[in-house]
Image (spheres, helix red, strand yellow):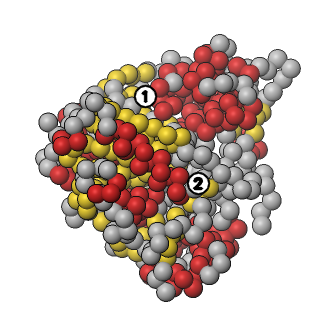
Amino acid sequence: MPCLLALDQGTTSSRAIVFSPDGRVLSSAQRELPQIYPRPGWVEHDAHEIWRSQLETAQEALNAQSVDRADVAALSITNQRETTVVWDRSTGEPIGNAIVWQDRRTAPLCARLRADGLEPLFTHRTGLLLDPYFSGTKLAWILDNVPRARERAARGELAFGTVDSWLVHKLTRGRLHVTDASNASRTLLFNIHTADWDDELLERLAIPRAVLPQVRGSAEVLATTHPSLELAELPIAGLLGDQQAATLAQACLHPGMAKCTYGTGCFLLMNTGAQATVSANRLLTTVAWRLGDSLAYCLEGSVFVAGAAVQWLRDGLGVIDRAEEVEPLAASVEDSGGVVFVPALAGLGAPHWDPNARGIIAGITRGTTAAHIARATLEGIACQVVDLVEAMEADAGRPIKELRVDGGAAGDELLLQIQADLLQRPVVRPRELETTALGAACAGALATGVFNSTDDISAIWQEGRRLEPRLNEREAGAALERWRESVERAKGWTPRH
C-alpha cells in the first residue's frame, strides 16, 4: 500500500509525518525551531536551521519501523507562508536570517505606501492589504538593508522564496526555484486574477523579477529529492501554504465551507470556489490551491497571536510550565472574573490591521489570579475568531453553519467550548488533528494518482468531536461587548513613524 510523506515546516517547529492513504499517521518526527528577536517587533529564523530541522525529521520519519521507504509515493511540503528567505543562487547561502511572517519592521514602509494611495492597487491585484505581514515588503527591506543585495538581485545572483521555495531548493540541491500559487498569493507581488507575478507591483516595491521563483501547481510532480539526502529519491509532488493545506484536509471543498486553525496564530478560511470574492471588511482574498489549470479561492482572516499567547503565559509570565497546563488552570475558575486579555502581542490582524496595537490585560482587580488570566487568554483567542467570522459572513453573504477546527490548540476542549459559546454555533474537530500535514499529503496523493479526485479527501475526513453552544445569546453578547471595548484601547499603542 502506498504512503505519503508530508513536511510541515511551521513557525515554532519542523515536523515530518508519514500518512497512509486513509489519513492515518504511520510515523512522525518533530524538532523545535528557535525564535530570534533582534529588536522589539522583529522576528527571525535561521534559514539553515529551518532546513536542518526539516531534513532530520524527514529522515527520522522515514526510518521508522512502520514505514517501508519503497512504499512512499510522494513527498509534499506545507509551510509557514509569508516568511521570507533570500539566498545566493550559486552557493545556496542565505544572505541573512529569514524574516518571519510575524515581523513588523516594515510597518513604516507600508504606511508610506498607503499614504501614497497605493493600497487599492495592491488589494485589487493581490487580494491583500498593505501590512508588514506579507512577503513583498520584507523582501524590499532585505534588498535595501543587506549590503549590495539590490545590485546583486538585479544581476540575477539572488533568489527569493517563501519557506516552500527554500526547502525545494535544498531538497533538489539547487536544481529548482519554484513555489505554488497558494504561497505566491501571500507575497503582495502575485496577481491572483492573472496567476502571474505583477510587473507594476514589482516596480512599486523596486523588486527585480529575476529574484522570483517560478509558480507551479499545488499538486504537481516537480522533481525528485537529491540522492545525497538519504530520502530515497522521492517525487516532490505537492506544495501548499499551511492554512490552505489545512483547508484541503478539512474537506472544505465547496463554497461556504470554513475551517479555523489554532496554531501560533489563528487562521479562518472560507472556500469561495472559482470566484475571488472582494472583501468589504478588510479580510483577505487568497488562492486556496491550483489543481491542474484551475484556481480555487478563499476569504481569509488572520490572527497573529493565538497559541503564541499561551506560550507567553509559559515563557513570559511563568504562570504555567507547559502549554498543556493552561486548560486545567483556566477551568479551575468559572469565568475570567471580568478580566479581558487582548493578545495583540504582534499587532492586530484582520479585520483591524493595526501593526501599532499591543496586547493589554484589562479588568484586573486585587482578586485576579493566574487562573483568571489563563481563562481570559483562551477567551481572547476565541473572541478574535468571532471577529473574523462576523466579517467573513458579511463579505460572503452567507452564514458559516459550523466551524471546522484544527491545530495544536484545538486539542483544548475548554477553548473549543468557549468558541462555540461565543459564536453561538457548533464547533467541529476532526478525528485527525494533523490537518496541515495531511493537506500536503493529500496534494501529493492527487499529483501521483494515489487519489483519483478531491472526492477521496472528503471520504477520509471524519468528525472527532462536536461542541454545541452552552452560553445563552445575551451572555455571549455581553462578553463580546467587553472584548470590543478592550480592543479599541489596544489600538495605536506604539508611535506611528
Instruction: Return the mark for residue 45.
Output: 2
The picture places residue 19, in percent across and down from the top left corner, at 27, 36
The picture places residue 71, in percent across and down from the top left corner, at 18, 41
Instruction: Return the mark for residue 356.
Output: none
> Crowdedness of circle 1 by 10 Å Cα count: few (<14), some, many (20+)?
many
- Decide if residue 308 is on the left or right side of residue 398: right
Is disc 2 placed on a helix, strand or loop?
strand
Is disc 1 placed on a helix, strand or loop?
strand
- Decide if residue 343 is on the left or right side of residue 446: right
Name the N-terminal-most of marks 1 and 2: 2
Residue at image coords 29%, 44%: 5
The picture places residue 2, in percent across and down from the top left corner, at 17, 40
Residue closer to the observer: 484 or 247:
247
Residue at image coords 58%, 81%: 150
Q: Quadrant of the C terminus?
A: bottom right
Give, as a three-letter code, the residue at label 2. His
Residue lying at the far right in this picture: please name it: 366
Residue closer to the observer: 90 or 238:
90
Q: Where is 4 relative to 96, above or below? A: above
- Quadrant in which residue 226 is drawn: bottom left
- Decide if residue 370 is on the left or right side of residue 101: right
Q: Where is 124 relative to 454, above or below? A: below
> Crowdedness of circle 2 by 10 Å Cα count: few (<14), some, many (20+)?
many
Q: Nearer the viewer, mark 1 or mark 2?
A: 2
Q: Which residue is mark 1?
A: 427
Residue at image coords 64%, 74%: 146
The alpha-carbon separation of the residues under discs 1 and 2 comes to 34 Å
Q: Is residue 104 among the parts visible in the rendering?
A: yes
Q: Is residue 351 among the parts visible in the rendering?
A: no
